Amino acid sequence: MKINKIYLPIVLALTLALGLIMGSLLNFPAQQSGFMVSNTSGKGKLNKLMDFIENEYVDNVNADSIVDLTVNSILEKLDPHSVYIDKNEMEEVAQSMKGDFVGIGVNFYMYKDSVAVIKPIPGGPSEKAGIKAGDRILFADNYKLYGRKLPNDTLFSKLKGEEGSMLSLTIFRKSENKKFNVKVKRDVVPIKSVDVAVMASKNLGYIKINRFAETTYDEFHKGLENLKKQGATELIIDLRDNGGGYLEKAVEIADEFLKDGQLILKTKNKKNRVDETKATKAGIFETGKLYVLINENSASASEILAGAIQDNDRGTIVGRRSFGKGLVQREMPLGDGSAVRLTVARYYTPSGRSIQRSYANGGEEYFNDFQKRYESGELYAADSIKVSDTLKFKTVKGRTVYGGGGIVPDLFVPLEGKHGDEAVSMVMQSGIVSYFVFEQLDKGRKDFAGLPEDKVIEKVVAGDKYFSAFNTYLLNNGLVFKLEKHKERVKQYLAAEFVRQLVSEKAYYEMILKQDNMMKAVQEKK
């Protein structure tokens, strides 16, 4: 397979970056804390140096930028997950872990020179106002949005606002070739951390968690209750590409499956204080088969949940070795709107193992671990997983598990496709498919108007029209693949994305899970 040089930054970034970045997110809610800076030792030197620069240096300098560089340099010497958050980034970082925001409720992206609506959020303000998929948003009040290549933060600032406030939008509807104005009342829009909760088979439920945010437990609990009502006596929790988030949300979810008094995790701080967290009587799924799906991007809180299930012999961990982050961060404000997210403890699974990977060779090598796993063959064969024989631990029932480098699954499932063909699966599960399908619909949305789900699928998989168009789309974006031998698989992925944009997220997952190798492995194990 020939891959253009553009392939690596696009495909690997799409599939890996989110998981690794999320792995650095905080594990505890922010706490009010500060630093008392004395005039002793190195602290005094830093203060004096800043005074000299501000008062004596020949040129005027931005003292804040120097401080930012200093803080970052210090944190880089600690560990890969202790990070500095600039005051300009704080709102965005905090927003990413909230369960909602106030806005107009649309999924969009910049298509050519305009803001194109991929899909209004069901039940959201835009859908209520009559905005449809494919609409272009030309103006927000009197602010021009098209033809300016505006960055996302500017776009968001124009569409977000106070709850209940009105926003006048100028819309162009291509399918009807008309322009019109519509008023949208901004409202609270949920940001889902649980993508879907569906039945995978007659008695097997499936829940996909993309991160552990403020509302994750509530979303999960509601989804689990609905699945039980539908007859689920067995459950799959999908934590693939989930980089973590709030530790206590993973704990709350683990409590649903463990019996009263069973250990969920232990944390140890600098003063060797050990805190244990145990399950309560509140669990609603303490019996019944349980499977947890993980991969190389499952990190932090995901590993806490998987480790608790594995060490208590409560379920089967399926997939590939997880990322390996066993450090706990706390967010500490620095007084000027910025903050430092500092590692304050290590966590241990119930058996006593730390799953933190070594970061002795620096952050760059630490975060590039995927490449090492790929080259070693670990992503394709269980016997290529390197674990330390000296870090053996025992589960409740006496099974051997290993520490020092992520959660090793009980049931290994390799990357989809043969060694060398994995890029095809990566691309088909990336955002590029979503953009391609949107653009195809934009050209011929009327061709799909009123079609039920089965007819949408039939239209996409019958013949090679969309397969060929996708191949051309990749070439035009600098990606060269030999897709022919994967034709039927590619068609199924394309059809699933058409279903997602035309029908629902639930319908998309019900279709795509039938192609999923980890799901097949669970079904075979049953």
Image (cartoon, rainbow, N blue to C red):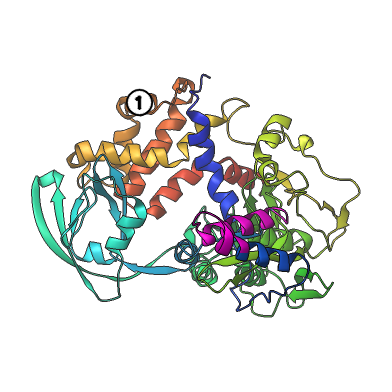
| Span shown in magenta | 52-79
Residues 466 and 402: in front is 402
The answer to whether one can see residue 376 in this image is yes
Percent coordinates x, y for residue 158 in the rendering? 27, 61
Percent coordinates x, y for residue 353 in the rendering? 82, 59
Element at label 1: helix
Q: Is the magenta stretch mostly helix, strand or loop?
A: helix
Residue position marked by numbered label 1 in the rendering: 476
Q: In this view, does 486 lie above or below 344?
A: above
Left/right of residue 133 with respect to residue 1 in the rendered view:
left
Amino acid type at image mark 1: Asn
Percent coordinates x, y for residue 323 in the rendering? 68, 49
Q: In this view, does 73 lie above or below 489?
A: below
Percent coordinates x, y for residue 191 in the rendering? 42, 64
Q: Is residue 214 above or below residue 407?
A: below
* Residue at 14%, 50% in the rendered image: 172
Left/right of residue 171 with respect to residue 95 in the rendered view:
left
* Residue at 58%, 61% in the rendered image: 56
Left/right of residue 435 with respect to residue 244 in the rendered view:
left
Q: In this view, does 11 lie above or below 135?
A: above
The answer to whether one can see residue 238 in this image is no
Rendered image quadrant of residue 312: bottom right
Residues 61 and 362: in front is 61
